[in-house]
Image (tube, coloured by chain):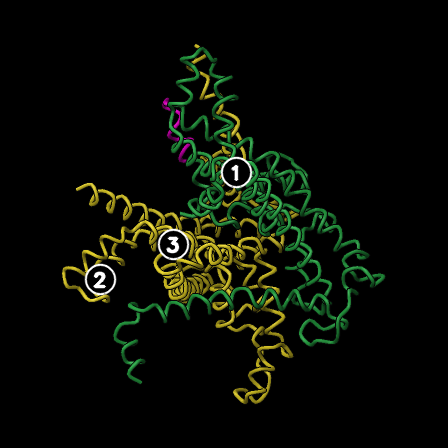
Chain colours: A yellow, B green
Amino acid sequence: MTRRWFWPLFAMPGAVWLVLLFLVPFYAVLAVAFGGVDPIFQAPVPVWNPLHWHGDTMRSVLDQLRPGQVFWIVFLRTFAYVALALAGCLAIGYPVAYYLARHARRFKALLLVLLIIPFWVSYLMRMLAWIGLLLPDGLVNRTLTGIGLLSHPYGWLDGQASSVIFALIYGYVPYLILPLWATLDRIEPHLLEAGRDLGASPWSTFFHVTLPLSRQGILAGSVLIALPMFGDYYTNDVISGSPRTSMIGNQINLFFQGGPQRTVGAALVIVLSVVLAILMSYYLWSTARASRLEVV
Amino acid sequence: MRRFRGWLANPWAKPRFLVVVTWGYIVWSVVPVVIAILFSFNAGRSRSVWQGFSLRWYWSDPNQSVWNDPTLRGALEQSLRLAALDMVIAVPLGVTLALGLTRWRGYGARPVNLLMLFPLVTPEIVMAVSLLLVFVTLYGVALGTTAQVLGQVTFSVSYVVLIVRGRLLSIGRQYEEAATDLGASPLSALRLVLLPLLAPAIFASLMVVFALSIDDFVVTDYLSSDASTQTVPIRIYSSVRGTTTPALNALATVMVATTLIAIALAFVIYRRFNAASGADTSALRDIAALEV
């Protein structure tokens, strides 16, 4: 009897914690989104019984999600920024991870430490660093005007989409490099040698051996950084601060700092979660398929 | 020119292209932070124009330095307080959960396993909003330090489970079985055999939780009450766009220095622990493997 309960007992505290502080809170978002609003204080009144839920808030949010409406534009913008930032991260991260896995013999330990440093410097500290550089009288503007590329300082921080995407790349690329490196590092050098021995050029060895073998790493790394980017609002706030570049995270944050519109914010959280759950299931489906193929 | 054409045709053969991209990336990722640290020593009020060296923003300025401005100093203290509490709660919770999940072969294990993965893929704003709503509408937990710790532990636990579980799977069960065959009770087998074997993973977890806590902005901000529960990232977020002084850079620098010193110390201790087994990079590996 004691044997049977020994290990489950170990799992209990953590399991209870996750139920109370992850599962129930998410249900609270549903209860608020499908609940009512106090007529006097405008505070959300959660409805805990799903039989009594009513969808007024959700309907109005979905209404705004139709093409051309406010939330539709914000969602499209979010997708565009995340896609561009992801492409930028891969363009930088893949060569770096490849170099680390294949060629960095002598410098491997040093490189690894240098690549891990951003993990130990807080994200907002790294944003602070760029804000200092991008200020009207910052180093970037002074250098560009100094060499004559700009005639007068450019307002990098005045609601520029390019600055936001640039900051997202800078912020998230470290988190992509390590999983990519872990995948590339696992590829057996014999496979590449076999490719070369069979007459493939380095390019086609790369395209036919390395790239397909690292596909899962690319996918996993992309998911790892795309999910937090979808909920990111602080990068946008500190780099742009303008509604012109606002992403879905900014929209949600706005409703929660604003007060009476918390039910709308909660409904948007649910919409975002559903969208991400769909993306996530695609990822899980593709990894499951890949591992099935490997077995065959 | 011929060299350039050769490079275009086959940039992957000799890694010149890769060398440039890699070291270029490193310079790009580190130099801005170094410049921000340099400006924390600026004598003037500017964060972008150098006006001479001083320690004014660390302690000599009577009102606005990190040492003398209570909001800046308070933010530093709150960051470290939350990190300590998060480590103390999340690591034991995660270690026991990992032990339970890997050894428990019942019906309940699968759903808990799944539930444990969810916080890893949930964007922080979703977690922050849901915790805020549940604390306000259902649990009646007052916003502030308690709520912040509860929130931070919730997103930290899963990382601990991943690290410890990875190590548990590579250890296997044979050591424990040997101990119980020799007459140890499950509990003493755990204490005398398994926990010492798990030490590197526990150490790696402590470091990761520390970094997660120090770095966190969204959950900590949503669950903060007033100025007294603001952390360093919250201070940076709320004042970086205003007309602020290099004291903000100084605050961030102190945080970076604290983190780096803590990690350096931890590695020295860890190396001493593992001098015999020669496993000094395994904590690094544990952390890197975690990201997959």
Circle 1 Cα neighbour tier, 10 Å, few/some/many (<14 / 14–19 / ≥20): few
Q: Position of residue B47 (x, y in %)?
A: 69, 71
Q: Position of residue B15 (x, y in %)?
A: 34, 68
Say which residue appears at 63% left-offset and 78% top-offset.
A136
Q: Which mark is residue A181?
A: 3
Q: Would residue A33 be found to the left or right of residue A40 on screen?
A: left
Same subunit, labels 3 and 2: the answer reads: yes
Residue A65: say if magenta.
Answer: no
> What is the secondary structure assignment of the residue under circle 1?
loop
Same subunit, labels 2 and 1: the answer reads: no
Is residue A76 visible in the rendered structure shown here? Answer: no
| Residue B90: quarter of image | top right
Residue B112: say if magenta.
Answer: yes
Q: Which residue is mark 2?
A: A205
| Residue B41: quarter of image | bottom right
Point out the frontmost of discs 1 and 3: 1
Residue numbers of the magenta segment: B105-114
Query: Which chain letter goes with mark 3?
Result: A
Q: Amino acid at mark 2?
A: Thr
> What is the secondary structure assignment of the residue under circle 2?
helix
Q: Amino acid at mark 1?
A: Ala
Specify which label sits upstream in the sequence, 3 or 2: 3
